Amino acid sequence: MHEYTHALFWFRRDLRLTDNAGLYHALKQSQRVSCVFVFDREILDALPDKANRRVEFIRESLVEIERMLRRHGSALTVLQGRPVVEIPALATRLKATAVFANHDYGPDAARRDQAVSAELTQIGVTFSTFKDQVVFERDEVLTQNGAPFSVFTPYKNAWLKRLTAGDLQGYASEKHLDKLAPMAAAEVPGLHHIGFKPTGLKALGIVAGATAAARLFDDFLTRIERYRETRNFPAVKGPSYLSVHLRFGTISIRTLARAAWERGGYGAQTWLNELVWRDFYFMILHHHPRVVTEAFRPAFNDLPFTNDPSRFAAWCEARTGYPLVDAAMRQLNQTGYMHNRLRMITASFLVKDLHIDWRWGERYFARHLNDYDLAANNGGWQWAASTGCDAQPYFRIFNPVTQSEKFDPGGKFIRRYVPELAAVSDKFIHAPWLMSAAEQKRTGVVAGRDYPKPIVDHAQARQVALDLYGAAKAARVT
């Protein structure tokens, strides 16, 4: 194993000091290690909203890392610019001969890393990256014929068959922090220094950093046995609420998967399956980068959606007249979070009721979700739109009213985010337009005045979608 006099560790989607694969290898292979994070201006400058929760989450997580590094007499170097310029320049300035990082999987990230690696090679600096975001990656789980899977269940079965305790063993990076390079204390730039505004994360109950992630996970472990029964009900504390932490790596995927695997039981196994779905979508993105802009299933790549801008605006602005859909969209717009069941319902509604191209909705979620991840967001949208691998069959279309009755039976979630419907009875909370005129007057909820009438008739819209998909499939066959 090569020992470097001085190396850099470059934080990206792994904002923690504990069980960090790349950081572990940097510390083990180097006499001293300096840590760096780069606010990539190419990404930041393209963000339309300068009150961005993800940027604030990253910044707050870096503050915690800086505080921890300071305890070891070191510091975090925080830069702004293009990594292809900033990383080689810092390596030169600090006389580092190696740069360590963890794998990143998106097409843009892969191109960035290739460019950084080429620049480092030019100045005689090695660039090494390690698996850290997923349990299994790229070609590690293949069919018996050596091909990538395109159906989830056989992938999951192969994933579980391959899994051993060694795959989930952590990297004890936190035990080697004595190798950190001595550095003067530094301050992480404030949001205004990078051109952004506060978003009030803590007021929304979102606390960044590894300490908060560990606290959330401990809380979830007290509820994990009930996860299978509670996960689909948005008014119930069922999910782990760890998605944004997993997205930015403030907690290790190995820690999560190991806890679920060791516990067993229906709840833990159901949650582990969700983590396997995450690996599956990373694998799909790696082998099929075209899914970023194209349907995985070519037959449905150019569906003749009507793409009515006014309908899309109503969906974005929670004015569809379907209470659960509107409540979900308000949750997203107000908090940056949406319950997973509601992601499926709102996506299905946009594509199969409003006949809007799934890519429009995917981009909207990408802009607003705190936990936005290209692989999972794309995979989820293509699943709901029936255009992806192992997707929901096109003829299975969520009914927004029956979904509401099933998963928010007392209307608790609806009333929280659509308070103008608070006085509506449980009987009509899912479809308030069905109230009689007298009932509407009594509750103060007159359809079309106090709350929108349904933007479409679900039964009619469903038939249009069936015809649209059916024609596309038939055309492909012939």
Image (cartoon, rainbow, N blue to C red):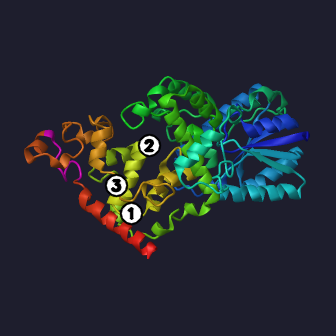
The residue located at (64%, 58%) in the rendering is 287
Q: Could you tell me how far apart the alpha carbons at marks 2 and 1 are, in whole angstroms?
A: 20 Å
The residue that mark 2 highlights is: 340
Q: Position of residue 251 (x, y in %)?
A: 62, 34
The residue located at (40%, 32%) in the rendering is 229
Residue furthest to the left: 438
* Magenta part of the chain: 443-452
Q: Is the magenta stretch mostly helix, strand or loop?
A: loop
- Within 10 Å of the Cα at label 3, are there few (<14), some (14-19), or many (20+) other Cα atoms? many
Residue 8 found in image quarter: top right
Q: Is residue 217 left or right of residue 162?
A: left
Q: What residue type is labelled 2?
A: Asn
Numbered circle sitting on residue 356 = 1
Q: Is residue 438 left or right of residue 175?
A: left
Q: Could you tell me how far apart the alpha carbons at marks 3 and 1 are, in whole angstroms?
A: 14 Å
Residue furthest to the front: 144
- Quadrant the C terminus occupies: bottom left
Residue 450: in magenta span: yes
The residue that mark 3 highlights is: 397
